[in-house]
Image: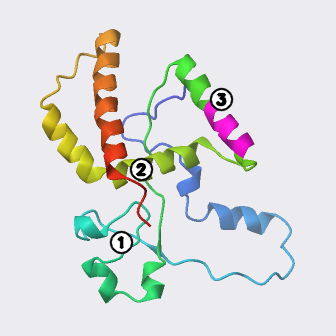
Amino acid sequence: MARRSPAGEEPFRPLLERNLISQLSSVSNPAPDVPKERPAPVVSLVQGSFPLESRNPFGKAIEGSKETSKQTPAQLETVEKLDQEKRMLLTRREGEAVERLVGTLASRLNSQVKLSHVLRAMVALFLNAEHELDRRAGEAGQLIRPPNGDIKALQQFEKQIGQIIVSAIRDAGPLKP
């Protein structure tokens, strides 16, 4: 398990260091002249800056929304920067099962698939079902979260949340483009 940073000290995140790549590339031999592809523009969207009906998990406006009619095709092709890290704990058995599932998926697709790809796809499904999830949660009523020490009650609580999510994803239909 990783150590925590001392209080008041930022944890070291090498992937978020702005100049790390340029520092590393200047140390190694320069690459031969290769034509560079035009990078996709990176934008930073503020939560709530678009109407709910015009957002999707990939930062593009959904067709038919008010935002689509105002934007040019070049604006619709923007790519949002991945800068939010979320962490969770799994049991050893769950961790092994998830890794096995990702490995099987990669093997069957004959492609490199990482856990992050699968989790981002699941987030896209989750966000696609946002309205149905809200409706189903409202129908379910209040759920009481048990204390962390009560493992069986926590598993039951998470199972109830899972039932709400699976119903919402099923009712939401396929992913919107």
Q: What element does badge 2 sit on?
A: helix
Residue 98 % position (x, y): 57, 30
Task: Indicate whether 169 appears above or below 153.
Answer: below
Q: Which residue is under mark 3?
A: 100
Dot placed on the residue nearer the N-terminal end, 1 or 2? 1
Name the residue located 61 percent from the left edge and 23 percent from the top edge.
Answer: 96
Q: Give the range drawn in magenta.
A: 100-108
Foreground of the two, 169 or 130: 169
Magenta-highlighted stretch: main secondary structure? Answer: helix
Tag 2: amino acid? Leu
Left/right of residue 50 with respect to residue 91 in the rendered view: left
State the residue position of label 2: 125
Q: Is mark 1 on a helix, strand or loop?
A: loop
User: According to the image, label 1 marks what residue?
Assistant: 62
For the C terminus, the image quarter is bottom left
Tell me the CA gap for discs 2 and 3: 21 Å
**Distance between the alpha carbons at the discs numbered 1 and 2:** 15 Å
Amino acid carrying label 1: it is: Ile
Give the total of numbered labels: 3
Question: Which badge, 2 or 3, is on the more N-terminal residue?
Answer: 3
Between disc 3 and disc 1, whose residue precedes?
Answer: 1
Provide residue 176's location: percent of width, then percent of height: 41, 63
Q: Does the magenta stretch include residue 107?
A: yes
- Reply yes or no: does residue 24 show up in magenta: no
Using a 10 Å C-alpha cutoff, classify the residue at mark 3 as few (fewer than 14 neighbours), some (14 to 19) or many (20 or more). Answer: few
Q: What residue type is labelled 3?
A: Arg
| Element marked by disc 3 | helix
Indicate the quadrant where residue 47 lies: bottom left
Q: How crowded is mark 2: few (under 14 residues within 10 Å), some or many (20 or more)?
A: many
CA gap between label 3 and label 1 equals: 34 Å
